[in-house]
Image (cartoon, rainbow, N blue to C red):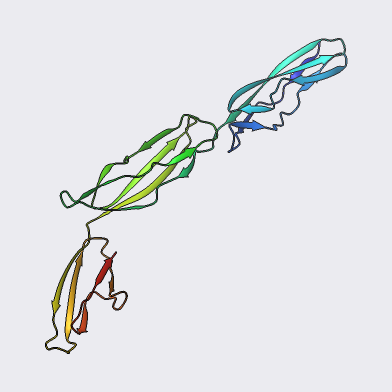
């Protein structure tokens, strides 16, 4: 009877990042021994090895039709983390005047994975949560069944609404240009941009004014 001096060594491999397994594996060759001639060495290996453990059975046949078998263990691991397809961009929100916080909505991240159909999604906040003034960080962790994970992180910045107070001084006499307007702005991000009369002036306070109407747009 033929015999296996040794089957090919067991293999521990990593799955492709875009599929749940591996193909085109070089399994190696067994060492065989027989009193007569070995006419065939075969195995039952699949063309595609899924993640997990696959037992490959090698069979040696000699000229007399006798056979011997040995097993080779092929292990394919999934080390690819889930792929995040979309993650929210930073969000700016305006606080209400009652409790200085904002209710913020967003679309949760979308994601996919090379292996797992059941992915675990965890987060420190969910859409519709209330956020205080200032910056808050929202973190999503997506984990697959092999323990691989990816993270989606974005910030939510809650600001008070812009408040504008103005103090104007009329020209001292008709036809003179010694009028002025002083503007005090609060709330928002703290960095303000001023547009008087469609870019005529860009500072908060304007001077040397004649009588007239002056329109101001403040943004942050």
Whether 118 is drawn above or below 198: the answer is above
In this picture, residue 127 sits left or right of residue 175: right
Whether 182 is drawn above or below 13: the answer is below
Closest to the observer, 8 or 198? 198
Q: Quadrant of residue 212?
A: bottom left
Closest to the observer, 164 or 37? 164
Identify the residue at image location x=85%, y=17%. Answer: 38
Q: Position of residue 124 (x, y in %)?
A: 32, 40
Q: Position of residue 41 (x, y in %)?
A: 79, 20
Quadrant that contains the N terminus: top right
Q: Quadrant of residue 28?
A: top right
Residue farthest toward the left in the current orientation of the protein: 172
Quadrant that contains the C terminus: bottom left
Q: Quadrant of residue 66?
A: top right
Q: Position of residue 30 (x, y in %)?
A: 75, 23
Identify the residue at image location x=32%, y=44%. Answer: 105
């Amino acid at each position: 009877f033929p015999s296996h001096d040794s089957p090919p060594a067991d293999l521990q491999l990593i799955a492709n990042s875009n599929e749940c397994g591996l193909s085109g594996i070089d399994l190696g060759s067994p060492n065989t021994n027989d009193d007569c001639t070995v006419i065939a060495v075969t195995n039952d290996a699949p063309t595609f090895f899924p993640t997990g453990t696959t037992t490959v059975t090698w069979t040696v046949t000699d000229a007399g039709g006798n056979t011997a078998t040995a097993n080779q263990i092929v292990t394919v691991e999934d080390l690819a983390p889930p792929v995040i397809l979309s993650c929210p961009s930073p969000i700016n929100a305006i606080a209400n005047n009652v409790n200085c916080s904002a209710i913020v909505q967003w679309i949760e991240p979308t994601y996919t994975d090379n292996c797992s159909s059941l992915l675990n999604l965890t987060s420190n906040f969910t859409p519709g949560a209330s956020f205080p003034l200032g910056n808050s960080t929202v973190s999503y962790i997506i984990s697959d069944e092999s323990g691989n994970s990816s993270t989606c992180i974005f910030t939510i910045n809650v600001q008070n609404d812009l408040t504008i107070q103005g103090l104007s001084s009329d020209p001292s006499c008709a036809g003179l240009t010694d009028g002025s307007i002083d503007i005090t702005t609060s709330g928002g991000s703290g960095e303000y941009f001023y547009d008087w009369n469609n870019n005529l002036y860009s500072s908060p306070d304007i001077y040397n004014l004649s009588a007239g109407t002056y329109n101001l747009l403040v943004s942050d």
